Image (cartoon, grey):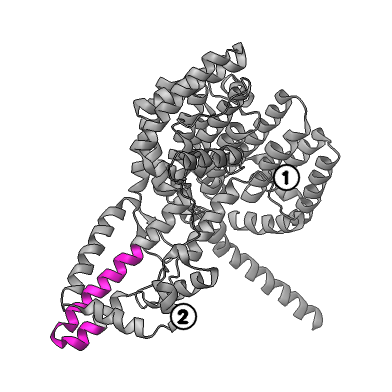
């Protein structure tokens, strides 16, 4: 009886297994040329999770993953540790082998490609003395990243990183002159159909950035955590860097054309809709329209009832303490440090919001209450949008670069840069001090014209003042060869005052001020102290909440320019890779 029951159970199990084969085949059948495959294959295709959707199919990679028998995470951790060890002991051959093995094991782990390509380009390259060897490892890191792009098509984070390393590592390194020359002549790296004029590292970087933008805008790839303003500004910024680089090499005619194209691309970037962290859509070039609309709405709201703002302000002033009122009424130049704080508190209290005006209008003229609320709501919304735009613009220094593209096309700027360039060559290569001084002085006269037409360049937000300070310091060094100093008639003393961060000219500035006093002229003014910024509030008078997101984007932009290697624990990377590859399979 027991033997018969056991036999019957086996028969039942066999029948059930056979019956399940049919639905399992419907679920897991692979896709072929003639068939979309089973349900799982169709879902992978629909959600772009198959390897064919992610990137190149590598039989060797698939074989390695199968050979680990479910221990891929352990194997990846072991190889990560080996790679770090080989780097530490400078065993570059075995490091390369370990990275190739990891590439087969973790082809869809994006962090692996970013970290190790950075490791090769930034950390391994500096271990060599000869710049040819350093360039070789910089290129190896770039090519390793490109290998990752073959496995991970339409991955904006990886494509953006590709553009970053091409531009910043080759174009900003201490050896940038040598790197740029080697890169242009590198037949092994460049495709055969790339013309010589397009072999500039900044143009190749721009091409990589545009590919990442196309992946998002045209093919629907996810931008991830990357700041949209930084992401979309990278391609036109590469064009600007190209223009700047070729002018440093003396190609000023091409530089003017490059700046013109950069200006056009920067304006196009200003028209790109960018999503704020709150979900609001921002367009940088809407700034002027919004400012005009805000002024118009403010006049309409305040004009509903005459004197409404004065009444609100009077009530707010009554709420100030005597100390706050006295500090606020005192001229800024006469305030003590404590009075600055009190004045700032008073300024915060006296801030009139659209909601306050609408409420007061409703009390004074109930028949206009609804209209005032509608105007106040629109005004508050426009003010918030404008504030968001300006915060996001700050992360890319939008206004400065728009101005830079404009003034770099001026004849005065062209003459200024070419004169300084020739002065440098005369002094360094021919030791012609008199000739160099004449060209420097001509260059500074032209720079004075540029600053006169674009006074905003005298602010510290951009880099132009710092660039000109480098030229002024060089000019001063040439004068020292003749035991002379910069004269009182020098046209760029204001630039020295604003941008001499290292106080190189502090003594000369003091002596010049003394001479001005002795001749009956007023000394040049010095800042009396910081004036508290006007607090930004939302429509209800509460502090605005958009500062954090803008600050985070600024930090991201700053981190992107940092030359340090990212730190990623090997064990965490290995475990993350297991999860990532599982999702992709």
Q: Residue at x 65, y 32 (%)?
A: 174
Tell which of 497 and 174 is nearer to you. 497
Picture coordinates of residue 232 (x, y %)?
44, 47
Distance between the alpha carbons at the discs numbered 1 and 2: 68 Å
Q: Is residue 315 at all visible to an observer of this figure?
A: yes
SS of the residue at dot 1? helix
Question: What secondary structure do most residues of the magenta stretch adopt?
Answer: helix
Rendered-image quadrant of the C terminus: bottom right
Q: Residue at x 44, y 46 (%)?
A: 459
Picture coordinates of residue 223 (x, y %)?
48, 53
What segment is highlighted magenta in the picture? 360-385
Q: In this rendering, is residue 60 above or below 295?
A: above
Queried whether the magenta region covers residue 373, the answer comes back as yes
Picture coordinates of residue 375 (x, y %)?
22, 73
Rendered-image quadrant of the N terminus: bottom right
SS of the residue at dot 2? helix
Q: In this rendering, is residue 468 above or below 29?
A: above
Q: Is residue 221 at all visible to an observer of this figure?
A: no
* Total marks in image: 2
Tell which of 196 and 553 is nearer to you. 553
Residue at mark 1: 102
Picture coordinates of residue 128 (x, y %)?
77, 30
Q: In the rendered image, which quarter is residue 316 located in?
A: bottom left
Instruction: Mark 1: give few (<14), some (14-19) or many (20+) Cα within 10 Å.
Output: many
Q: Residue at x 61, y 13 (%)?
A: 431
Q: In this rendering, is residue 371 above or below 485?
A: below
Residue 323, labelled with which disc?
2
């Amino acid at each position: 009886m027991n033997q018969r029951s056991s036999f019957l159970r086996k028969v039942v199990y066999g029948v059930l297994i056979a019956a399940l084969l049919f639905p399992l085949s419907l679920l897991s059948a692979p896709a072929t040329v003639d068939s979309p495959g089973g349900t799982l294959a169709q879902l992978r295709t629909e959600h772009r999770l198959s390897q064919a959707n992610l990137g190149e199919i590598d039989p060797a990679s698939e074989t390695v993953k199968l050979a680990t028998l479910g221990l891929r995470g352990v194997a990846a951790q072991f190889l990560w540790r080996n790679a770090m060890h080989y780097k530490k002991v400078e065993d570059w051959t075995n490091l390369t082998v370990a990275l190739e093995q990891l590439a087969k094991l973790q082809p869809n782990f994006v962090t692996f490609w970013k970290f190790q390509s950075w490791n090769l380009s930034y950390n391994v390259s500096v271990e060599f003395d000869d710049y040819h060897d350093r360039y070789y490892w910089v290129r190896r890191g770039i090519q390793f990243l490109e290998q990752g792009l073959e496995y991970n098509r339409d991955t904006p984070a990886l494509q953006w990183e590709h553009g970053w390393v091409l531009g910043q590592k080759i174009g900003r390194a201490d050896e940038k002159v040598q790197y740029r020359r080697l890169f242009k002549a590198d037949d092994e790296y460049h495709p055969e159909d790339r013309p010589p004029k397009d072999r500039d590292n900044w143009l190749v970087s721009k091409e990589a950035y545009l590919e990442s933008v196309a992946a998002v805008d045209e093919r629907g790839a996810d931008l991830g955590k990357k700041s949209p303003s930084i992401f979309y500004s990278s391609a036109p910024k590469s064009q600007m860097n190209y223009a700047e680089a070729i002018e440093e090499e003396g190609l000023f005619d091409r530089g003017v054309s490059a700046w013109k194209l950069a200006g056009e691309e920067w304006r196009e970037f200003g028209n790109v809709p960018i999503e704020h962290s709150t979900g609001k859509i921002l367009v940088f070039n809407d700034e002027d329209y919004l400012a005009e609309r805000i002024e118009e709405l403010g006049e309409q709201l305040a004009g509903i009832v005459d004197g409404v703002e004065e009444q609100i302000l009077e009530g707010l002033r009554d709420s100030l303490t005597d100390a706050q009122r006295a500090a606020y009424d005192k001229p800024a130049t006469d305030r003590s440090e404590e009075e600055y704080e009190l004045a700032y508190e008073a300024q915060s209290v006296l801030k009139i919001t659209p909601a306050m005006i609408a409420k007061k209008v409703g009390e004074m003229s109930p028949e206009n209450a609804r209209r005032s609320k509608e105007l106040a709501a629109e005004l508050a919304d426009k003010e918030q949008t404008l504030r968001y735009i300006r915060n996001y613009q700050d992360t890319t220094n939008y206004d400065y670069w728009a101005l830079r593209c404009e003034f770099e096309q001026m004849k005065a700027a062209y003459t200024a840069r070419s004169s300084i360039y020739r002065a440098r060559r005369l002094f360094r290569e021919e030791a012609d001090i008199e000739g160099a001084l004449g060209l420097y002085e001509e260059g500074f006269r032209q720079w004075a014209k540029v600053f006169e037409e674009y006074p905003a360049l005298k602010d510290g937000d951009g880099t132009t003042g710092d660039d000109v300070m480098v030229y002024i310091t060089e000019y001063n060094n040439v004068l020292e060869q003749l035991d002379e100093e910069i004269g009182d008639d020098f046209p760029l003393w204001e630039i020295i005052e604003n941008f001499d961060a290292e106080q190189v000219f502090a003594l000369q500035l003091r002596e010049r001020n003394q001479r001005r006093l002795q001749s009956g002229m007023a000394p040049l003014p010095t800042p009396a102290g910081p004036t508290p910024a006007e607090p930004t509030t939302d429509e209800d008078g509460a502090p605005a909440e958009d500062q954090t997101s803008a600050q985070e984007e600024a930090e991201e932009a700053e981190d992107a320019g940092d030359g340090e290697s990212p730190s990623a624990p090997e064990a965490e990377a290995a475990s993350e890779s297991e999860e990532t590859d599982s999702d992709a399979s």
